[in-house]
Amino acid sequence: MEAIVVENLVKRYDDFEAVRRISFRVRKGEIFAFLGPNGAGKTTTVHVLTTLLRPTSGRAFVAGHDVLEEPEEVRKNIGIVFQEPSVDRELTAWENLLIHGMIYGLSREEIRERGRELLEFVELWKFRNRPLKFFSGGMVRRFEIARALLHEPQILFLDEPTIGLDPQTRAHIWEYIRAMKERGVTIFLTTHYMEEAERLADRIAIMDRGKIIAEGTAEELKRLVGNDVIYVRFEGKTECFEADFVRGCRILPDGRVRFDVENASEALPKLFERARELGLRIFEVTYHRPTLNDVFLHLTGREIRENEENPMKSAMRLWGRMR
Ligand SMILES: Nc1ncnc2c1ncn2[C@@H]1O[C@H](COP(=O)(O)OP(=O)(O)O)[C@@H](O)[C@H]1O
Ligand SMILES: [Mg+2]
């Protein structure tokens, strides 16, 4: 069964269409990622699916419930980590957890039991009595993940879970996300980091300017761009050869041989073996696999900008708007 079903969803802010008729399905138990640049409409979609915003048109079902008709049921079954941290920094981790549990109608006993287990899960148990203003960005994120799981939701929404974190902390958070999947939680995440989508997600929808422009596994998406390419330099004689795993072969002016293959990691051992059979000695091998950035570039003619916003630039823009 599907965890999320979205049909022709539109969200307009005044006369600006932020989400333009998107449809997709998220299967139970999978990690599904929305990958797209700033302004693509990812957060808007998350807000509609989590019942914080009403869709302009179209339908969305989350955990089997219509977001418009049964928002209470939807909310009971989901956990959310927002793009911007949403904690009370003056309160301790434990106090923040307690408040959250009470909002969800959990008993003190339930909060104590699950709270301890979850804070241990994200390795914050020993910091539970510390006000969150003393937590690092990564610790706050981990806390928010634990908090979002307190009422045992089936589906967890993570809006840019590692935005602004250093690579090491980011990798750490990825481990928790994988562990949550192991526990059977369905995960819907948004990101503008290609590596994050590629490393975590079972399936990815690439979003740009309010539309889903491609959807599939990372492998499927990369196939949209074309084949993997292997470049080989032989010792002594140079020649092209045919094989079932070779789509095309060409000798380049610099003496290297270019093999087009469907999947470089599968083709490489076969290529070595075939060369040995033919008595060709390999001197050098390099290969190129399309990245998700190549996919985005191929589909839009632009690159997903991964670097963080330059704070000066956003300040200037804000200033421009205020005038
Ligand atoms: N409350 C709002 N009012 C008007 N426009 C908005 C509002 N929230 C977002 N937008 C615009 O909608 C577009 C999509 O925004 P958002 O969903 O936040 O994208 P993303 O999360 O992919 O960066 C952007 O152009 C943004 O400026
Ligand atoms: Mg966003």
Image: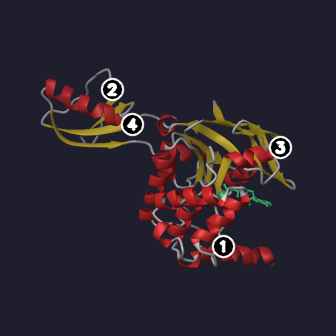
Q: Are marks 1 and 3 in contact (CB under 8 Å)?
A: no
Q: Quadrant of the N terminus?
A: top right
Q: Amino acid at mark 4?
A: Asp
Which residue position holds label 2? 246
Mark 2 or mark 4, which has the lower sequence index? 4
Q: Secondary structure at mark 2?
A: strand
Q: Is residue 85 visible?
A: no
Q: Distance between the Cα atoms at labels 1 and 3? A: 29 Å
Which residue position holds label 1? 88
Q: Quadrant of the C terminus?
A: bottom right
Q: Amino acid at mark 2?
A: Val
Q: Is residue 63 visible?
A: yes
Q: Is mark 2 within 8 Å of ligand 1?
A: no
Question: Alpha-carbon neighbours of circle 4 within 10 Å: few (<14), some, or many (≥20)?
Answer: many
Q: Are marks 4 and 3 in contact (CB under 8 Å)?
A: no
Q: Distance between the Cα atoms at labels 4 and 3? A: 45 Å
Mark 2 or mark 3, which has the lower sequence index? 3
Which residue position holds label 3? 68
Which callout, 1 or 3, points to the residue nearer the camera?
A: 1
Ligand 2's quadrant is: bottom right
Give the quarter of the image for residue 318.
bottom right
Which callout, 2 or 1, points to the residue nearer the camera?
A: 1
Give the quarter of the image for residue 22.
top right
Foreground of the two, 132 or 227 = 132
Q: Distance between the Cα atoms at labels 4 and 1? A: 49 Å
Which residue position holds label 4? 228
- Residue furthest out toward the front: 109
Q: Distance between the Cα atoms at labels 2 and 1? A: 58 Å
Q: Amino acid at mark 1?
A: Asp
Foreground of the two, 137 or 15 = 137
